Amino acid sequence: MKRILYVANALKPNTGRLDFTLYVCRLAEAGLKAVFYIEKETYAAEATWINHAAVHAGLLANEHTSALKRQLCDAHMHEFKTRCEQEGIPCSVHKTEDDFLDEIILESRYADLVLLDIAIAYTPGHISIPTPVAEEILRSTECPVIALPETFNKIDELVFTYDGKISSMYAIKQFTYLFPGFKDMRVTVISVNPDVVANEERYKFMEWMHDSYSNINFMAVEGDERKGLLEILLQRRDAFMLMGAYGRSRFSTYIHPSHADNVLKMTNQPVFIVHP
């Protein structure tokens, strides 16, 4: 059985991310280990929200805000585990405050896949998504990562980016090995810099793809390649995107860092990321 690690904020669960997580677990026939992050500090701007959320969850709102926050986190974790059990997904759950990044990196070494809420460790006044903590996880994990969508309905299409480099083919192979059930899904392969890929390399790639998938459409980015790729990706709906390597210096060289961040920030599609 494959081992999937789910990483999210215990204080603010998201139904869409959970729906997609359960979808992936069923698809990969995998068990789930959930690590919920709890920030030690409770920000003044959170107090009103925490009190309202606690009342909605049936908790007594006459306690100190920090105590309510912990109770609320525990309630959300219990709801998460209950939903997994109802769906028949083997699941273990725990929360963490200290050495969070070190724990996630270590856990990823023994996982097949990480499912990540890229808004994790969000703080008031800091509007960057992915958050700095999420970016560090994306750079440092030792297995593939999926940046989770905020809402989820269905998957109708797989979108792969390919530039003939080791990182892009490695990502496609990892995705395919993890999700053999997608063999008959509609696949769009976006070729970046197609003219620089040797004919023999292109032939071998297409041969491999046709051995692995039954419904493939190949297209090339025209004009401004970086801008064109971003526009194509942002036009997709109900798609599962594969963007190649999120290396130690962010995404592989054919995707400009600002464009890669914009895709994660602007799209509501799941994004598969891996580095060799």
Image (tube, rainbow, N blue to C red):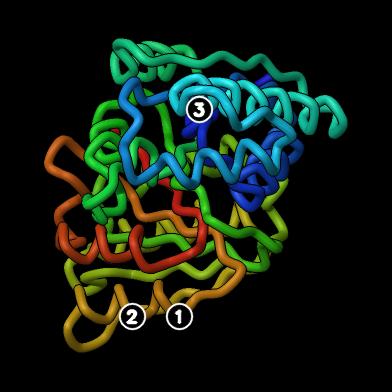
Which of the two residues, 189 or 143, is positioned nearer the viewer here? 143
Q: Is residue 160 above or below residue 105?
A: below
- Looking at the rendered structure, the kind of residue marked 3 is Lys
| Label 2 element class | helix
Which of the two residues, 153 or 73, is positioned nearer the viewer here? 73
Question: Which residue ends up furthest to the bottom in the rendered image?
Answer: 223
From mark 2 to mark 3, how far is it between C-alphas?
Answer: 40 Å
Q: Provide residue 193's location: percent of width, then percent of height.
A: 21, 70
Q: Provide residue 33's location: percent of width, then percent of height.
A: 60, 19
Question: Which residue ends up furthest to the front in the rendered image?
Answer: 62
The reply to whether discs 1 and 2 touch (Cβ–Cβ < 8 Å) is yes
Q: Residues within 10 Å of mark 3 (few under 14, many from 20)?
A: many
Residue 231: numbered disc: 2
Q: Earlier in the sequence, mark 3 or mark 1?
A: 3
- Looking at the rendered structure, the kind of residue marked 1 is Gln
- Looking at the rendered structure, the kind of residue marked 2 is Glu
Q: Locate residue 224 relative to residue 271 in the image: left or right.
A: left
Q: Earlier in the sequence, mark 2 or mark 3?
A: 3
At horizontal 36% and vertical 12% (from top left) the residue drawn is 103
Provide the residue designation for mark 1.
235
At horizontal 33% and vertical 70% (from top left) the residue drawn is 191
